[in-house]
Image (cartoon, helix red, strand yellow):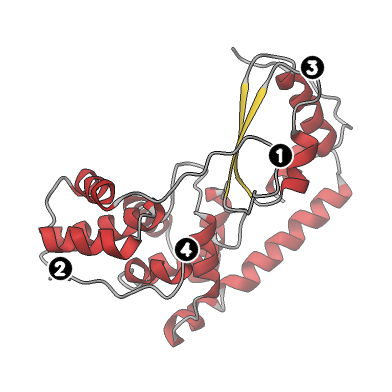
Amino acid sequence: NILDITFRSDMKFDDRAQVTFASLGAASVLLIYDNVVSFEQAAPWLPLSGMPCHVLMTTLADNASMLWPCLEVKPLSRDQSLELVKELTGGQLPGAAARAIAEHAEGLPVQILPDAATLAYEQRRGRPIPTRLSIATGTNESFRAAYDRLDQPARLLLRAAAFFNTQQIPSGELSRHLIQALDWTAGDVERTFDTCLDLHLLEDWPRPRIHQLFASFVRETPLGADDLLAFARVGPVQAARFVELAFGLSSNPADLDTATLL
C-alpha cells in the first residue's frame, strides 16, 4: 500500500517526520531502523502502547542493558565465509586466495565483500593474486587490503563521500563537489562511482550508502602527499556548499528539499 500524507507548507521537518511515524505506526507494518547508533535517539520513534506496528533495529552498539528482545548475529563460520567468497567471485579465485579472504575477514561479511570483489577484479586483469592478506590490527584496519588497491579517483571519491550521512549520500551533491573541485567530468564521476559500487565499497543507487565502519576507516586514514594535495581542493568546496545550504534554509525554513539535503 502507498501512504499518502499531505503536509502544511509551514510544518517543520521534525513535525512532518512525527506525522509520518504516527501514520505508519497506526498500521500493521514492520519498521526497520538500520545501523542505530544511539538507543536514546531512537526512543521517540518506538511504537506507543496500543500501536499495532513492530520495529526491528540493527546496531553495532552495546545492547546488553536493553530490556527489548535481542538477537545476536554472530560472525560467519569459516565454511560460511568460504561459501560467500565463492558466490561473490563465481568460484574463480584460487583456493589459497579464497581461504586468505576468509581468514582475514574473521567472519565479518562487511570485510569479505570488498576483499573478494577486489581480488576478483585484479584477477580479471591478469594481476598476481596474493595468497595471504595483511593481518588486521583492528576492525577499521581490516579494510586496508581493499583500500590500498584503489586508484586515486576512487580514494578521493570515498573520502568525499564519508563527509555525508553514511546512510543516504546525495550522489548529485557529491558529483557536484568533485566536478567543481577537481575539474572532473560527469563521465569521470560515473566511472569512479561504478568502481566503488563494483567493489562493494558503496552500496545502492542513486542514494548510495557507505558502511559506517568503512566510513570511519576512510576518514581516519592519513592521505598520501598526492591525495592530500588533491583533496585540499575538495574540502573547501564541500564546506562552502554546506554554508550555502544553511543560509538557504535559514531564509526559507519551510523548504523541505533544502532541509533534507542539509
Indicate the position of residue 78 as horizontal and vertical percent values. Answer: 27, 53
What's under tag 3, amino acid-wise? Answer: Gly
Label whose residue precedes the other's in the sequence (3 or 2):
3
What's under tag 4, amino acid-wise? Answer: Leu
Q: Residues within 10 Å of mark 4 (few under 14, many from 20)?
A: many
Task: Look at the image and tell me in which quarter the N terminus lies.
Answer: top right
Mark 3 or 4: in front is 3
Between marks 2 and 4, how big is the CA–CA gap?
A: 24 Å
Between marks 3 and 1, how big is the CA–CA gap?
A: 18 Å
Q: Residues within 10 Å of mark 2 (few under 14, many from 20)?
A: some
The answer to whether 254 appears left or right of 59 in the picture is right
| As drawn, 205 above or below 30 | below
Mark 2 or 4: in front is 2
The label on residue 99 is none
- Can I make out residue 183 in this image? no
Q: Say which residue label 4 marks.
A: 158
Is there a contact, CB below 8 Å, between mark 3 and mark 2?
no
Q: Say which residue label 3 marks.
A: 50
Question: Disc 1 on helix, strand or loop?
Answer: loop
What's under tag 1, amino acid-wise? Answer: Leu
Q: Say which residue label 2 marks.
A: 129
| As drawn, 260 above or below 62 | above
Indicate the position of residue 45 as horizontal and vertical percent values. Answer: 75, 34
